[in-house]
């Protein structure tokens, strides 16, 4: 039986970009990988295509950036338990289009592997 993936983070911005976005040749919809780093942050890695000696194509995983602390706090327990997550690029602004490059990702996973949001404390309406 298959578990249905549900949106955990529909759209969140990566902080501390470590690559030149235009040079990575990434596009919207590309698959990424989330990994828990040694310092407790959640790093987002992408397969970046490069050529060895200008001839032989190869793909290596490179760190794009990290999730913000609040978003990383939602994802870290799922990564520790080995829950399958689907991470995709949903927004991309390279350096030549804006003064500051941006990469936005979405994270989907099985709801039982991710802590639920706390219930709101608003009272039910009368009537």
Image (tube, rainbow, N blue to C red):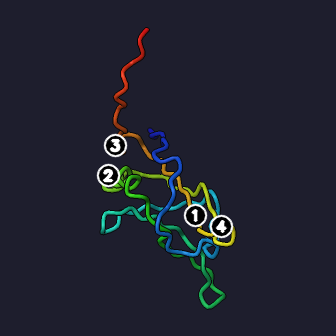
Residue behind mark 1 = 102
Disc sitting over residue 77 in the figure:
2
Residue behind mark 3 = 115
The percent coordinates of residue 117 (x first, y second) are: 37, 38
**What whole-number distance in Å separates the C-alpha atoms at marks 2 and 4?**
34 Å
Circles 1 and 4 in contact, beta carbons < 8 Å? yes
The percent coordinates of residue 70 (x first, y second) are: 38, 53
Q: Pointer 4: residues within 10 angstroms few (<14), some, or many (20+)?
A: few
The percent coordinates of residue 30 (x first, y second) are: 60, 60
Circles 1 and 2 in contact, beta carbons < 8 Å? no
Disc sitting over residue 98 in the figure:
4
Q: Secondary structure at mark 4?
A: loop
The relative height of residue 81 versus residue 94 in the rendered view (above or below) is above
Q: Earlier in the sequence, mark 3 or mark 1?
A: 1
Relative side of 40 to 1, left or right: left
**What whole-number distance in Å separates the C-alpha atoms at marks 3 and 1?**
27 Å
**What whole-number distance in Å separates the C-alpha atoms at marks 1 and 4?**
9 Å
């Amino acid at each position: 039986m298959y578990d249905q993936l549900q949106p955990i983070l529909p759209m969140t911005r990566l902080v501390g970009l470590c690559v030149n976005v235009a040079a990575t040749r990434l596009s919207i919809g590309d698959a990424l990988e989330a990994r828990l780093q040694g310092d407790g942050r959640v790093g987002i890695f992408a397969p970046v295509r490069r050529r060895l000696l200008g001839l032989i194509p190869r793909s290596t995983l490179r760190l794009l950036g990290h999730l913000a602390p609040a978003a990383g706090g939602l994802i870290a327990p799922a990564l520790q338990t080995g829950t399958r997550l689907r991470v995709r690029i949903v927004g991309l602004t390279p350096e030549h289009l804006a003064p500051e490059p941006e990469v936005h990702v979405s994270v989907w996973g099985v709801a039982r592997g991710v802590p639920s949001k706390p219930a709101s404390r608003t009272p039910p309406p009368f009537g």
